[in-house]
Image: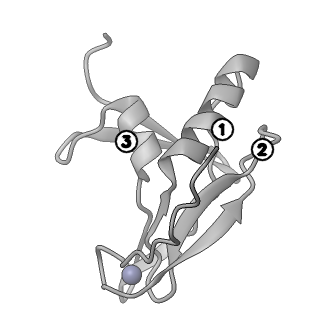
Amino acid sequence: MRQKKPERFLACPKCGSNLKKTEVNVEGAEQKATSYQCVKCDYFEFEEKSAANVVKELKAKETPLKIKQKIIKLSQDRLGMYFNKNIVDSLALKAGEEVYVSVPDKSHIILKINKPAI
Ligand SMILES: [Zn+2]
């Protein structure tokens, strides 16, 4: 017997607006991941359990983690993007770390993390 959990209303940690629950297609995975996206800014996070399931499925298939994200406007002429928590966790990224950015062709950006191999 499972008890139904009350629907959680989450607030965006960046701007305080409501987060909308959305099902996200992850390339290479059959199941969808549940994410919470801010209605105002571009913040989003994955619901941990569904993200873990997707990562598990991808690992089983040996598909690299691939997530669709939007390029966001940081200021007048600067664009950027966030690393979401799943990427941060799987790579153990920390603020201040250096990355080498290379552009091999018109449709790829490669980020090489500048830290000693484990
Ligand atoms: Zn927000």
- The residue lying at 75 percent from left, 55 percent from top is 25
Is residue 114 shown left or right of residue 48?
left
Mark 2 highlights which residue? Answer: 31
* Image: 75 above or below 28: below
Residue at the extreme top of the image, as rendered: 118
Residue at the extreme left of the image, as rendered: 96
Is residue 30 shown left or right of residue 70?
right
At label 1, which amino acid type do we have?
A: Val
Mark 3 highlights which residue? Answer: 88
Mark 1 highlights which residue? Answer: 54
Within 10 angstroms of label 1, few (less than 14), some, or many (20 or more) residues? many
Name the front one of labels 3 and 2: 2
* Image: 8 above or below 30: below
At label 2, which amino acid type do we have?
A: Gln
Front-most of residues 114 and 48: 48
Front-most of residues 20 and 70: 20
The quadrant the C terminus occupies is top left
Front-most of residues 21 and 71: 21
Locate ligand 1 by image quadrant: bottom left
Q: Are marks 1 and 3 in contact (CB under 8 Å)?
A: no
CA distance separating discs 2 and 1: 7 Å
Is residue 108 shown left or right of residue 78?
right
At label 3, which amino acid type do we have?
A: Val
SS label for mark 3 = helix
Earlier-in-chain disc, 2 versus 1: 2
CA distance separating discs 1 and 3: 16 Å
Residue at the extreme front of the image, as rendered: 1
SS label for mark 2 = loop
- Mark linked to residue 93: none
